[in-house]
Image (cartoon, rainbow, N blue to C red):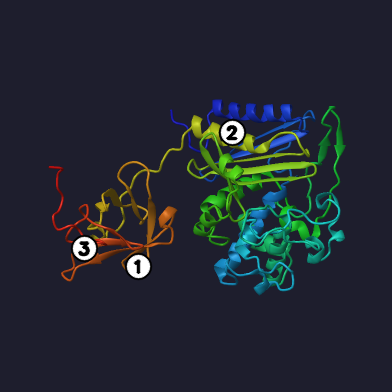
Amino acid sequence: MTTSQGELLPGTRRALLHRIAVAQAEGRAPSLVAAVVRDGTMVWTGARTSVDGHAPDENVQYRIGSITKTFTAVLVLRLRDEGALDLGDPLEKHLPGTGVGEATVAELLAHTGGLAAETPGPWWERSPGSLRPELADVLGERPLLAPPGRRFHYSNPGYALLGALIEKLRGASWEEVLRREVLEPLGLHRTSVLPQAPHAGGWAVHPWADVMLPEPLEDLGRMAPAGQLWSTTGDLARFAAFLVQGEERVLSAASLREMRTPAAPHEAADVAGGYAYCLGMEIRRRNGRSLVGHTGSLPGFLACLMISVDDDVAAVAMANSTSGPLLFPVAADLVRIVAEAEPRIPAPWRPLADLDPSLLELAGQWYWGTHAFALRLTADGLVSLGPLSGAGRRSRFRSNGDGTWTGLEGYYAGELLKAVRRPDGSVSHLDLGSFVFTRQPYDEGAPVPGGVDPGGWRGIG
């Protein structure tokens, strides 16, 4: 008997339930909900609650805090893909007069714009947005703490600026643009700026007594693009699948890969902790696994969405308490439980649909100096180049349609690979960003920079 890849085994489901039960009990959360996505489909949901007979399901809204930033980043990448802006553009080009216009769009996305972490005045998460009606009220008199581009410093006002940028270029409110361009096309009908029943109430749990206090619910106004949204495990599961697979009506898989690529300089502590920030997404490491997504919190609520792209497993966890359960470890463990108990079953190997004979001629072993590399043609139409053994520079390359290829990752990301041919049409060598790869180590028949000693290879005697 075989089990469908879309159906988790009973032991896996029990392990998932046990993990969130421990988190809810030890974290003293009024409720905790979670979901797991595999192969783009939600395969498990679970909930634990302090209210007997009323466990929330995948349609109950919780506030998701800074996971909102990932939605805002998707809108910015859409504008970039349409040609309305470049990520290297200074903010001043599109949104003049802010006083922080030298920061680029990419720097704001990656929290390297030099902006303060919070707004001046009352705690913005527990006070109405009407107290900050203009961007100047969000930024205050000292908006920059460091020169743009110098260091990673998480900034909520930076995402308020990105929301204003979206409004300026679209001529509509951030909320309207988000609904029209992301929520509706992805079918996220239970994700909204303001809560829609059924939704959880936000609570503060006393640190030294098992009692609770209701938290205020505020409309964040200008700060909404940094943390306003409410959503459900069902909707966030669909959003997680989109963040891996893409949806051409919203954002391509290639642009989402770019969003998942580290973009911020690391602090020493971040390097040690395995943390990096991308373009509206975070990368964290736990138990040897790389996870990408975002965490979120607002008074009364905690949230986490994490994805293991390699395992094609994602997890969502949310609780309605100001503090208590640490949801990143919970989400990471949900991913681990599924990935280890039921490892991903790879798709069947299939050969290339079409073969260019001139490309096949390039496959095989090449040498960069004395380092042995292998060039392979893969069924997805890409070329891969990497060392034959051990660690080293490796990358996949996408064809440019003119006999050249562009690197997609690692040291060779964006670099040009081309085959250099002799007058008779035979291949002399590969050129990769000025590096010469030859069929033999220091091939005397190829234009190796610096030349090859005419005495050739020799022994010690």
Residue 268 placement, left or right of 68: left
Q: Where is residue 123 in the image (x, y as percent from the top left)?
A: 83, 50
Q: Which residue shows up at 55% across the image and 25% down it? A: 11
Of residues 169 and 95, the one drawn nearer to the viewer in this rendering: 95
Identify residue type, mark 1. Answer: Gly
Q: Position of residue 23 (x, y in %)?
A: 69, 30
Query: How many residues crowd around disc 1 within 10 Å: few (fewer than 14), some, or many (20 or more)?
Result: few
Query: How many residues crowd around disc 3 within 10 Å: few (fewer than 14), some, or many (20 or more)?
Result: some
Residue 312 placement, left or right of 318: left
The residue indicated by pointer 1 is 401
From the viewer's perspective, is residue 89 above or below residue 239?
Answer: below
Cα distance between the residues tagged 1 and 2: 43 Å
Identify residue type, mark 2. Answer: Asp
Is there CB contact under 8 Å for labels 1 and 3?
no
- Mark 1 or mark 2: which comes first in sequence? 2
Of residues 288 and 35, the one drawn nearer to the viewer in this rendering: 288
The residue indicated by pointer 2 is 333
Query: Secondary structure beneath disc 1?
Result: loop
Residue 274 visible in the picture: no
Cα distance between the residues tagged 1 and 3: 20 Å
Cα distance between the residues tagged 2 and 3: 51 Å
Q: Where is residue 49 in the image (x, y as percent from the top left)?
A: 75, 31
Of residues 87 and 437, the one drawn nearer to the viewer in this rendering: 437
The residue indicated by pointer 3 is 428
- Mark 2 or mark 3: which comes first in sequence? 2
